[in-house]
Image (cartoon, grey):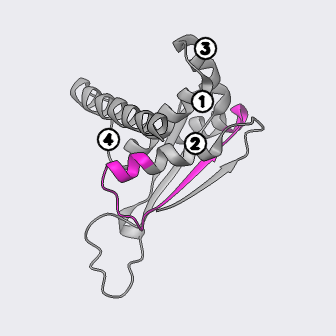
Amino acid sequence: MSIEIANESGVEVDTDAILAVARHALDEMGVNPLAELSILLVDIDYMAELNHRWMGSDGPTDVLAFPMDEGSVDHGPGESGAGEPALLGDIVLSPEVAAKQATVAGHAAADELHLLTVHGALHLLGYDHAEPEEEREMFALQNKLLHSWRAGRKAG
């Protein structure tokens, strides 16, 4: 699995842990090992701009997920194009918003970034939380993935 990460936020974060939790979530979800994902950490102003441009909301948000359009994926010879796309898309995170949310939630900013990374990955895989049933399913899966990742880190 190819996961690229760029920290343009100006905030120091453990990008290795973000990569690890993203890889864990995608592996556990059975995503094609050839899939590609991009994770971008941005400052609060750029996140506010993206949130306004793409979601029509004012102010910054914590995470945005931009799935690739499956129809635009180029498949190699012998590939039918069926199944999952090679390019999953982009997850954009705001460490500053995550830190504020972590304080309110009573846990570390790093834990909030891990949660938001899994949340973004699930959005790229088609999960949503607009309806109560969807929210229950997505958040339960998110919690399960985070729990198994944390358990694996403690064991290792």
**Could you tell whether 94 is left or right of 54 in the image?**
right
Of badges 3 and 1, the one in the foreground is 1
Local crowd size for mark 4, using a 10 Å CA cut-off: few (<14), some (14–19), many (≥20)? some
Would you name the residue on which mark 4 appears?
127
Kindly give the residue lying farthest to the bottom in the view shown.
77
User: Does label 4 or label 3 sit earlier along the sequence?
Assistant: 3
Would you name the residue on which mark 1 appears?
110
Q: Nearer the viewer, residue 149 or 51?
A: 149
Would you name the residue on which mark 2 appears?
17
Would you name the residue on which mark 3 appears?
103
What is the three-letter code of the residue carrying label 1? Answer: Ala
The answer for how far apart the CA atoms under marks 4 and 3 are is: 26 Å
Q: Nearer the viewer, residue 69 or 32?
A: 32
Asked which secondary structure carries label 3, the reply is helix
Q: Nearer the viewer, residue 138 or 44?
A: 138
Residue at x 73% of width, y 39% of height: 9
Q: Which residues are magenta?
A: 24-46
Asked which secondary structure carries label 1, the reply is helix
The answer for how far apart the CA atoms under marks 2 and 4 are is: 23 Å
Are discs 2 and 4 less than 8 Å apart at CB? Answer: no
User: Does label 1 or label 4 sit earlier along the sequence?
Assistant: 1
Of badges 4 and 3, the one in the foreground is 3
Kindly give the residue lying farthest to the right in the view shown.
10
Of badges 1 and 4, the one in the foreground is 1
Residue at x 32% of width, y 63% of height: 84
Query: Is residue 40 in the magenta section?
Result: yes
What is the three-letter code of the residue carrying label 2? Answer: Ala
The percent coordinates of residue 154 (x first, y second) are 47, 34
User: Does label 2 or label 4 sit earlier along the sequence?
Assistant: 2
